[in-house]
Amino acid sequence: MSATVTRSRFDGAQWCQLEVVVAKVCECRNVSERKVVKAIDRGATTIDALRASCNVARQCGMCIPRLEELIAERAGAARPVRSAGVANPSMTAPAR
């Protein structure tokens, strides 16, 4: 998924029109891959964390496979966590 965006730039002598291809990860929410990568680099390493920080994966869910790929690529995770609904073992009470 990508979109072409036209930008204007002054090159010192004249204004130029540039066509920039922007990779979209989430078409429903119009979220770019660049925004998602920045969020992952800042620590958003689950789908739920990306949902909160980038507003992705809130409608159709078609972006989830690509989000998981980006998490694996950027964070080095072997298998990204899809949901934070699993209890954190460090937060459970000690066994008696």
Image (cartoon, rainbow, N blue to C red):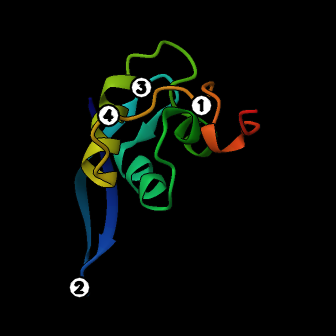
Q: Are marks 4 and 2 in contact (CB under 8 Å)?
A: no
| Residue 18, image quadrant | bottom left
**Between disc 2 and disc 1, whose residue precedes?**
2
User: Secondary structure under badge 2?
Assistant: loop
* Disc 1 target residue: 84
Marks 3 and 2, how far apart in space? 37 Å
* Disc 3 target residue: 27
Q: Which of the two marks, 4 or 3, is nearer to us in this view?
A: 4
* Disc 2 target residue: 13
How many numbered marks appear? 4
In this view, the residue in front, 91 or 3, is 91
Rendering coords of residue 48 (x, y %): 57, 33
Is 43 left, or right, of 89 in this rendering?
Answer: left
Marks 3 and 1, how far apart in space? 23 Å
Marks 2 and 1, how far apart in space? 53 Å
Is 45 left, or right, of 65 in this rendering?
Answer: right
**Between disc 3 and disc 2, whose residue precedes?**
2
* Disc 4 target residue: 79
**Between disc 4 and disc 2, whose residue precedes?**
2
Q: Which of the two marks, 4 or 2, is nearer to us in this view?
A: 4
The amino acid on which the numbered mark 4 sits, given as a three-letter code, is Arg
